[in-house]
Amino acid sequence: MRIQLLSDLHLETEAFDPEPAPDAQLLVLAGDIDAGHEGLDRFAGWPVPVVYVAGNHEFDHRDIDEASTALRRRCERLGFAMLERDTLVLTVGERRVRLLGTTLWCDFDLLGVGSRDRCMRAGHYFLEHVQRSTRDGMRFGGVQVRDEFLRCKDWLTQQLSLGRRGPRWDETVVVTHFGPSARSADPRYGLQPASASFCSNCEDLMGRAGLWLHGHLHCRHDYTIAGTRVVSNARGHVGRGEADGHDPRFTIAI
C-alpha cells in the first residue's frame, strides 16, 4: 500500500491546492488542515480512501468535545474516516493494514518529569491566547491537555498490545497529530521547553507498528526507532519558509 501524507496545510490562512499523488492508494491527513474546518471539503470525492486525524488548531476557540463531534459529522458527510481513538482496517489488493488514529496531544514530560512545570509554562501562551479551547465551559489548559494525552496513550498502548500483525491485519500504522519522539522536534529551534508542546516520548511503543505518521511540527521527518518508521510531511506556513522543499505528492510504502 502506498500512502500519501499531508498535514499542517493551515488552509484558514494558506493558499494551497491539494492534488492526489498518482501512485497513492490511501490519503492520510494528519491534522491542522483548516482551523475553520471548511478546508476539509476540498478532499470530498478524492480518488482513494481518506483518513483524517484532527490537529490542535481544529479545536481553536471551541469546546473540545463539540468540535470533535462536528468534525466527525463533516467527515461522514464527505465520505471519509475521522479517527480519534479509533481503529480502521483497510484492504488494498491482498494487503490488510490496521490504522490506529488519535490526536495524541502531549504530556509536557519531553525533557523529563522534573521539567514538566517549566514546559507547561512554555506552552501557556499558546493554549491561553491562541488555541483558547474549552471543555464543559472550563479552559482546556496544560493540565487538561496532559490528561487527554494520557487517555490517548493508554488507548494506543492497549491497541498496540494486540500485536503489530494479527489474524485480521498484515501491518499496523499509527497516525497522530503530535510527534511521538524528541527526534521529531523542529531542528530550527533545538530541544527546548517549548518542544514539549509538540512532542512526547512514546518511544516505548515503537516496534509495535511498522509506521507512525504525524504532523504538528512544521518540518519534515523520516527516521526509524526499534523497527518503527516515523514520518512527517507537514507543510507549514509559506511566509516563514516552512513550506520550502515540501512535496505535496509525497508517498510512503507500507
Image: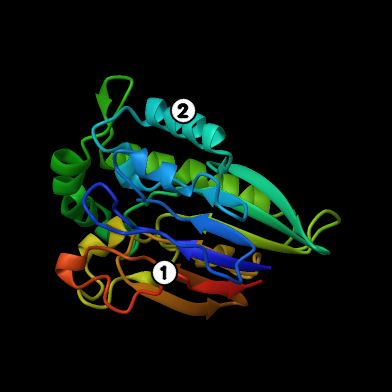
Q: Quick one: 109 or 98, which is closer to the camera?
A: 98
Residue 202, visible in the rendered structure: no
Q: Is mark 1 on a helix, strand or loop?
A: loop
Residue that extends furthest to the right in the rendered view of this protein: 167
**Residue at (26%, 24%) from the top-left corner?**
138
Q: Where does the image place residue 86, in percent across and percent down from the top left? A: 61, 42
State the image quarter where residue 131 is shown.
top left
Q: Where does the image place residue 245, in percent across and percent down from the top left? A: 32, 79
Q: Where does the image place residue 72, in percent across and percent down from the top left? A: 50, 33
State the image quarter where residue 180 is shown.
bottom left
**Residue at (72%, 51%) from the top-left corner?**
89
The residue that disc 2 covers is 69
- Image quarter hosting the C terminus: bottom right
Q: Which amino acid does label 1 sit on?
A: Pro
- Image quarter hosting the N terminus: bottom right
Query: Counting other residues with Cα less than 10 Å from the Cα at mark 1, is it few (<14), some (14-19), or many (20 or more)?
Result: many
| Number of marks in the rendered image | 2
Q: What element carries label 2?
A: helix
Image position of 110 with respect to 79: above or below: below
State the image quarter where residue 35 is shown.
top left
Residue 189, visible in the rendered structure: yes
Q: Earlier in the sequence, mark 1 or mark 2?
A: 2
User: Which label number is shown at residue 248?
Assistant: 1
Image position of 76 with respect to 169: above or below: above
Describe residue 152's horizontal placement relative to residue 186 as left or right: right
Q: Where does the image place residue 210, in percent across and percent down from the top left? A: 65, 69
Image position of 186 with respect to 15: above or below: below
Colour scheme of the rendered structure: rainbow
User: Which label number is shown at residue 157?
Assistant: none
Q: What residue type is labelled 2?
A: Thr
